[in-house]
Amino acid sequence: MDLSTLDTLEPPVQRKVGLFGGSFDPPHLAHMALAQHAIDRLELDELRVVPSGQAWYKKSSETHRLHRLAMVKLCFAQWPQVIVDDREILREGPSYTIDSLRELSTEHTNCRWYLIIGEDQARSFETWREWSEIVQLAQLVVAKRPDLDISVPDMAGWHNQATHTAVELDFPMMDISATSVRAALAQHRPVFQWLSPAVIDYIHRHNLYRTT
């Protein structure tokens, strides 16, 4: 290469990568809709869906981590922009977002990270381990819920406003929760309106969420 041309070379364009974590117990259609909404609205090159292992705020998950991982993979099997990242499932001990962000930032140096969290999570964000470093490594994106009332000006108190601003991601209300899905499955009620066919089939084959 002619060294005289080095000064004219443009730096590589950063890839925009979203990070969407959760217990996904089970993963439902609202998770999938939010993933698609984030990809479209944030113009992401890639979305990493990260099922939690042993969440620090829970003693244990109701469903084995490998079952949850398998169901998430089924949800996003045909999505070319989605990578199901198993690092937290495989990590021993409590699972923290900051650890995953540090690892990913080291592994992928030319990425702009977008951490997608729910509005309910936003309310307790200051309890997250090393939250101040999280906002240095990733752009916070909060998926707003119509039944909760929190705004970007209120969220500005989380972090150093001079360098970071939380982004709101307006998301149409979907009356689905993993808790209600688990309750319906335990009572042998239909869940086709909440879960993908592949996940329903997996749950039935492995007899998950049944109490009797």
Image (tube, helix red, strand yellow):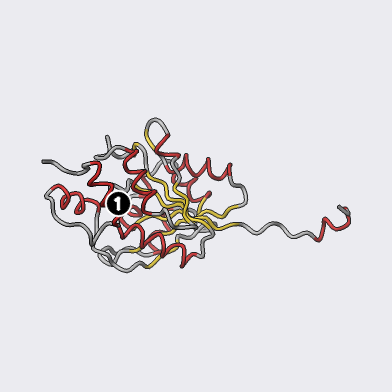
In the image, residue 189 above or below residue 150: above
Q: Is residue 178 left or right of residue 102?
A: left
| Nearest to the observer: residue 51 or residue 167 | 51
- Image quadrant in which you'd find residue 51: top left
Q: Report the residue at 43% width, 43% height from top.
A: 97
| Nearest to the observer: residue 128 or residue 2 | 2
Disc 1 residue crowd, few under 14, some 14–19, many 20+, Cα 10 Å: many
Looking at the image, the residue that sits furthest to the top is: 92
Q: Position of residue 60 (x, y in %)?
A: 27, 36
Q: Position of residue 8 (x, y in %)?
A: 81, 61
In the image, residue 8 above or below residue 131: below
Q: Is residue 189 left or right of residue 200?
A: left
- Image quadrant in which you'd find residue 31: bottom left
Q: Position of residue 50 (x, y in %)?
A: 42, 46
Q: Secondary structure at mark 1?
A: helix
Residue assigned mark 1: 199
Q: Amino acid type of disc 1?
A: Val
Number of numbered discs:
1
Q: Report the residue at 68% width, 57% height from top.
A: 12
Q: Report the residue at 20% width, 49% height from top.
A: 182
Q: Quadrant of the C terminus?
A: top left
Q: Position of residue 208 (x, y in %)?
A: 22, 43
In the image, residue 15 above or below residue 60: below
